[in-house]
Amino acid sequence: ARVAAEAAGAAALEELSETLRRARETGRLVLDLPLDAIAADHLTRDRLPAEDEDMAALRESVRAHGQRAPIEVTPLAGALPYGLISGWRRLMALKALHAETGEARFATVQALVRKPETAADAYVAMVEENEIRVGLSQYERARVAALGAARGVFPDEEAALRALFGAASRPKRSRIRAFLEIWRALDGILRFPAHLPERLGLRLVEALRAGQGPRIVAALEAADPATPEAELAVLGAALARPAAPPPAPVDLAPGVTLETRLSGRTLTLRLRGRGVTPELAAEVRARLDGLLP
């Protein structure tokens, strides 16, 4: 009887150990991990860092009630054992509270260990978690798609949009695609791009396409806005101004008229008229080739 009981106990312990192992490997077991064991920059974050009311409220909630929902991490082979997938704001709140108070209860973070098959899967998990919890701004959606493509996680920006926002409607993806133009033209210029409303953003896209980018950049740099509200006011005023008319066409030669248009960093030169021939096209191309280094 004793042998049978010991065998049954060993079998039960082995089964429990196997169950815990499977739960951990499949991301169903919550672990307490040291804050400094997690690489917060493992992925390009979809959320832009900001100290706003929501972040302050989250920090006070964690102070009063502790961490309510686990973050998601993935095992790494580098200097730190884990890389952050989702839960950046919760991790930052705990780090801030631990730095402020030194309390041991803020020194660890509850985490689920995930093992995405590819880097693209990790990005999708990050975006989906933030979309469900708070919702990303259109600029943040465009930014993570652009950076994911730039880092080779996705073949190109279009593939990134389809992978990250596959559940979104086609019109919604089209609006995110439009915000890519804002990211290309004004990344580093806008101080509070996550606060840019969709309607104002789409107006801004139209202005950029019309070649008003340099004027808008100049307005932002001159105003030097210190708050999201101030930046939105600068953009609203800049977009309310009528666009400068394009240069008038110039007659280069009998039957040849030159039209010039500058849109952002794209210069368009258009030759029109009966004097435009294949021979003229070849000569213009040869002269342009000679102008460029």
Image (cartoon, helix red, strand yellow):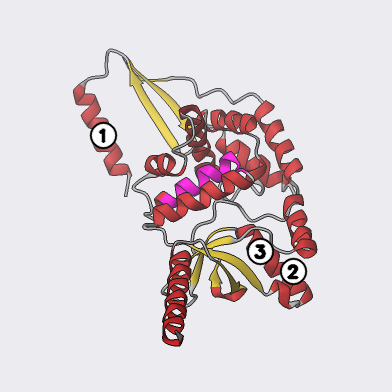
Amino acid type of disc 1?
Arg
The residue that appears at 26% across and 19% down in the rendered structure is 276
SS type, badge 1: helix
The percent coordinates of residue 70 (x first, y second) are 61, 61
Which of the two discs, 1 and 2, sits closer to the camera? Answer: 2
Element on which disc 2 rests: helix
Q: Where's residue 225, x and y in %?
A: 73, 47
Q: Is residue 31 left or right of residue 9?
A: right
Q: State the residue position of label 3.
A: 92
* Local crowd size for mark 2, using a 10 Å CA cut-off: few (<14), some (14–19), many (≥20): some
The magenta stretch spans residue 105: no
Residue 177, position as x, y percentages in the image: 47, 35
Magenta highlight range: 135-148
* Residue 119: quadrant of the picture: bottom left
In the displayed structure, does residue 154 sit left or right of residue 79? left
Q: Residues within 10 Å of mark 3 (few under 14, many from 20)?
A: some
Local SS, label 3: helix
Q: Of the residues under marks 3 and 2, which one precedes in the sequence? A: 3
Crowding near the residue tagged with mark 1, few <14, some 14–19, many ≥20 C-alpha atoms within 10 Å: few
Residue at figure coordinates x 24%, y 27% from the top left: 281
What type of secondary structure mainly makes up the magenta span? helix
Q: Which mark is residue 285?
A: 1
**Observer-nearest of 129 and 152:** 129
Q: Looking at the picture, which amino acid does disc 2 mark?
A: Leu
Instruction: State which tag comes first along the sequence, 1 or 2.
Output: 2
* Marks 1 and 2 close (CB-CB < 8 Å): no
Mark earlier in primary sequence (3, 1): 3
Residue assigned mark 2: 97
| Residue type at numbered disc 3 | Met
Report the mark closest to the observer, 3 or 1: 3
